[in-house]
Amino acid sequence: MERQIQNQHYEVYEVFVQRDALSHHVHVGSVVAPSAELALQVARENFLRREKAVNIWVVKQENVHATSYEDQDFFANQVLSKSYREVSGYAENARKWKAFKQVAITVDDLVNDIKEH
């Protein structure tokens, strides 16, 4: 039995927990285990002993792909202002539209202007 345990290769698994059906999975930590099935068991014991959850994911750390902190070029295209895509941008758009409507010429104004000349 000891020989079998020594030959097993342990890997690091990242653990993600979903607290309720309407929540996103959230990274809660890492565990070390020889298989995904055992990683699930270890993760349950380590992270869900006192808290409830409806789902748990374990992902081999080598399968998690992330950007490097030094790779600022990856995020370079975010320099342009895209506030119109954000909820906060709608208030600004509403203010601009109201200001535009106050100075914009209406069809009635054009008709009246033509009649006067």
Image (cartoon, rainbow, N blue to C red):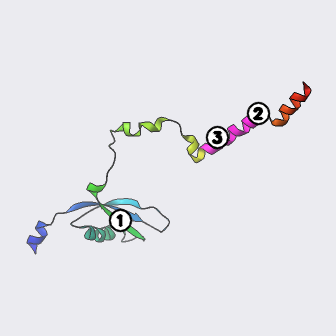
Give me the residue at 34% from left, 39% from top.
Answer: 71
Instruction: Look at the image and tell me in which quarter the N terminus lies.
Output: bottom left
For mark 2, what is the residue? Answer: 104
Q: Residue furthest right?
A: 116
Q: Quadrant of residue 46?
A: bottom left
Q: CA distance from mark 2 to mark 1?
A: 56 Å
At label 2, the amino acid type is Ala
At which x and y percent is residue 75? 41, 39
Are discs 2 and 1 less than 8 Å apart at CB? no
Mark carried by residue 32 = none
Task: State the SS at label 1.
Answer: strand
Give me the residue at 83% from left, 31% from top.
Answer: 110
Q: Residues within 10 Å of mark 3 (few under 14, many from 20)?
A: few
Observer-nearest residue: 109 or 20?
A: 109
* Mark toward the start of the polypeptide (2 vs 1): 1
Relative vertical location of residue 18 with respect to residue 65 in this rendering, above or below: below
Observer-nearest residue: 34 or 112?
A: 112
Q: Residues within 10 Å of mark 2 (few under 14, many from 20)?
A: few
Mark 3 or 2: in front is 2
* Mark toward the start of the polypeptide (3 vs 2): 3
Mark 2 or 1: in front is 2
Q: Residues within 10 Å of mark 1 (few under 14, many from 20)?
A: some
In magenta, the rendered stretch is 89-104
At label 3, the amino acid type is Glu
Relative vertical location of residue 117 with respect to residue 79 in this rendering, above or below: above
Q: Residue furthest left?
A: 3
Observer-nearest residue: 74 or 116?
A: 116
Task: State the SS at label 2.
Answer: loop
Mark carried by residue 57 = 1
Mark carried by residue 92 = 3
